[in-house]
Image (cartoon, rainbow, N blue to C red):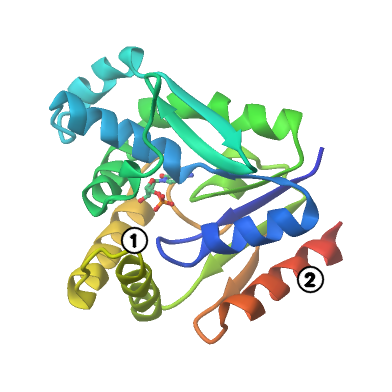
Amino acid sequence: MVSVAIDGPAGAGKSTIAKRVSAELGFIYVDTGAMYRAVGAACLEKGVDIHDKEAVIALLPDISIDIVFRDGEQRVILNGRDVSEEIRMEKVSMTASVVSAIPQVRAFLLELQRNFARNYNVIMDGRDIGTVVLPNAEVKIFLTASAESRAERRTRQLEEKGVHADYDTVLRDIIERDHQDMNRETAPLKAADDACIIDTTELNLEQSVQKIIDTIKEKL
Ligand code: DC
């Protein structure tokens, strides 16, 4: 089995690019952020205070997350309910980032993530895939872009979905999430020593997809 790890900050285009690249290479695309989002959504649903670590940990045995693929697209099933759309809400983004700093939450999701790589050729995206989840991945990419260009793209994406978004708020959220994701003790966001660092600030989607396909083909 071949694994491609793509890590990077929020809004760098990991999922859009990884979806395209996986379709082209015939790999399955696994979005690990969605799993943290599902844990965050479960806390919101049950009214659990995400800053109360013990309360979040106590909720874990009641959380069941299944990842299924429909028409090649990952769907997230939380306690039997498809939450793939609702976990994209902005309030879930921040919640996911907070609960993802809890080591027990990370341990809870680790096996689920590793299992995919045992059974399929995968492109897996997240924050710690090349460093912790799949340290032996054949290809490791760290995808980044300036906070401003990430905020611009995210604002546009939300507007396209019909969700009103304010650039300054999106930028502030991105900076706050970067800070949280990079500064936590367990599995912080950082490039693996052997990762190829790709900055997409000056690249459009097509150029980014091509650059990643070229990088993967060079390594395999
Ligand atoms: O990629 P995303 O924005 O959907 O991820 C949501 C949050 O989940 C992100 O702010 C940090 C956390 N996350 C993580 O800690 N490790 C991963 N491998 C993926 C996501």
Tag 1: amino acid: Asp
Q: Is residue 38 visible?
A: yes
Query: Which residue shows up at 54% across the image and 78% down it?
Result: 200
> Hey, which quadrant is residue 52 in on the image?
top left
Q: Is residue 212 left or right of residue 220?
A: left
Q: Is residue 119 left or right of residue 91?
A: right
Q: Position of residue 133 (x, y in %)?
A: 59, 38
Tag 2: amino acid: Asp
Q: Position of residue 74 (x, y in %)?
A: 55, 40
| Pointer 1 or 2: first along the chain | 1
Where, quadrant-wise, is the C terminus in this rendering?
Answer: bottom right
Q: Position of residue 162 (x, y in %)?
A: 28, 65
Report the Cα–Cα distance between label 1 and label 2.
Answer: 27 Å
Q: Is residue 193 visible?
A: no
Where, quadrant-wise, is the N terminus in this rendering?
Answer: top right
Identify whether 194 is placed above or below 46. below
Q: Position of residue 70 (x, y in %)?
A: 59, 37
Extreme-top residue of the structure: 61
Residue holding disc 2: 214
Tag nearer the camera, 1 or 2:
2
- Helix, strand, or loop for circle 1? helix
